[in-house]
Amino acid sequence: MADMLSTMLLANSMIKTSSTTMAIMCSSSSTFVPQIHNNFKRRPISSFPTKPLFSVSPKAFSSQTSNPTSKADEPPTSVGFLGLGIMGSPMAQNLLRAGCDVTVWNRTKSKCDPLISLGAKYKTSPEEVASSCDVTFAMLADPESALEVACGKHGAAYGMTQGKGYVDVSTVDDATSKLISRQIKATGALFLEAPVSGSKKPAEDGQLIFLTAGDKSLYDAVAPLLDIMGKSRFYLGDVGNGAAMKLVVNMIMGSMMASFSEGLLLSEKVGLDPSVLVEVVSQGAISAPMFSMKGPSMVQAIYPTAFPLKHQQKDLRLALGLAESVSQPTPIAAAANELYKVAKLHGLSDQDFSAVMEALKTRLQSPAED
Ligand SMILES: NC(=O)C1=CN([C@@H]2O[C@H](COP(=O)(O)OP(=O)(O)OC[C@H]3O[C@@H](n4cnc5c(N)ncnc54)[C@H](OP(=O)(O)O)[C@@H]3O)[C@@H](O)[C@H]2O)C=CC1
Ligand SMILES: O=CCCC(=O)O
């Protein structure tokens, strides 16, 4: 296993140009101390050592593998991937390009075809993928689909056994993640939640940020795989913490986008050039890559989908539920959520979440006035 993962990391370094792993651990708190690993310090490929930069726990995977011809002490890591949407497809593609043995499944089979042509294997159900792979990743739309694929009829749980691992990278609420964790762990397998920060382009570039929680031994074992798909990873302790962190981040993001949309439209209404506003914002203390990246196309009312608006509204809804569970007031996020709901009513669900700006335009709010 260690040799296999070493090979994968070296292949990954060729994809990403370079990688350095750094662990930051605090020591003075009695509460759980998160572990942060960044690999965004870049070095030329030629400066890389030939030995792996990490230590892994091969015991997390059993030696019962899908490849009976391999040596018992060097089991290949076979990786399953369930859900090949905007995010899942490039993530699975990066694993394939790094030399991993990848088996895919997607509800709409046609989305598997590009990956199959790149060398992926295909199975007809999540159960079959899980039973044929050491570790299975899932990148599903929402809590309902994540639960269905993990625990429904022919779901992954039916293919899980001791020695296997299930890594759910979908954005769901903590209750759903805990439910999936219980079902997977009841089979003897290990579970890790690992939702991601970063959108379509970071997924394509292997620059995602993983927010993980759950079985630490599985986290250690899949770290080389996370490093193929991402630039950093946080280990946050018990299942639910990764989901909660992701929802808090996306709650902030959804509110920021709604506020930015108001600013763009207000600037235009008072006779300013919104393109100049984008430039001004980019140079000040409130600059954010999101504003610089999405601003120019928003000014033109073009919303190429990277993060579907329906998913942003789902995340706000789930974040509000999280806030409710601890009686934390979140009036800004609640208002933003209403705006995304209006945008959905106007048929913008599958556009990028920046299309929320359309919900602020008079012609959309009051169709009768057109
Ligand atoms: N796009 C982004 O920028 C980011 C998204 N996320 C999160 O990642 C997850 C996936 O996002 P993204 O790839 O953009 O979404 P997509 O809508 O592109 O893909 C959703 C995936 O879920 C599958 N799916 C939906 N419903 C079901 C179901 N009932 N049963 C089985 N499969 C189902 C879809 O299958 P099918 O192809 O058949 O429809 C597809 O594979 C979401 O939780 C999202 O919030 C996280 C970070 C960034
Ligand atoms: O969940 C989606 C996050 C999108 C992003 O982080 O850019």
Image: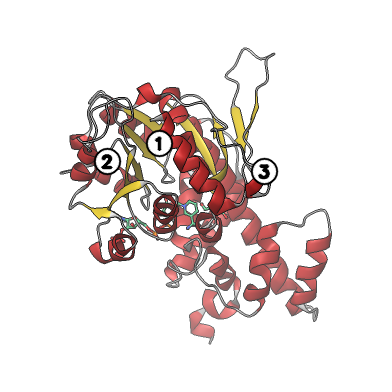
Note whether 230 is above or below 163 in the view shown: below
Residue of label 2: 150
For the residues carrying marks 1 and 2, which lies nearer the camera in this image?
1
- From the viewer's perspective, tell me whether residue 140 is left or right of residue 313: left
Answer left or right for 217 relative to 266.
left
N-terminal label among 3 and 1: 1
Residue 334 in sight: no
x then y, percent, for residue 338: 52, 58
- The quadrant holding residue 183 is top left
Real-space CA distance between mark 3 and mark 1, rounded to the nearest whole angstrom: 21 Å
Q: Compared with residue 288, is residue 78 higher up or lower down, i.e. above or below?
A: above
**Label whose residue precedes the other's in the sequence (2 or 3):** 3
Residue type highlighted by circle 1: Met
Q: Are marks 2 and 3 in contact (CB under 8 Å)?
A: no
Task: Identify the residue shown where x is 22% and y is 26%.
Answer: 187
Place of residue 125 in the rendered image (x, y in percent of width and height, measured from the top left):
19, 49
Residue identifier under label 1: 4
**214 relative to 54 in the view: left or right:** left
**x and y, in percent, of residue 97 in the image:** 43, 54
The amino acid type, in three-letter code, at marker 2 is Ala
What amino acid is labelled 3 in the image?
Ser
Residue at 63 percent across and 75 percent down: it is 297
Total label count?
Answer: 3
Q: Secondary structure at mark 1?
A: helix
Mark 1 is surrounded, within 10 Å at the Cα level, by few (under 14), some (14 to 19) or many (20 or more) other residues, namely some
User: The N terminus lies in which quarter of the figure?
Assistant: top left
Dot 2, how many residues are within 10 Å of its Cα: few (below 14), some (14-19), or many (20+)? many
Pointer 3: what residue?
Answer: 47
- Foreground residue among 55 and 336: 55
- The answer to whether one can see residue 38 in this image is yes
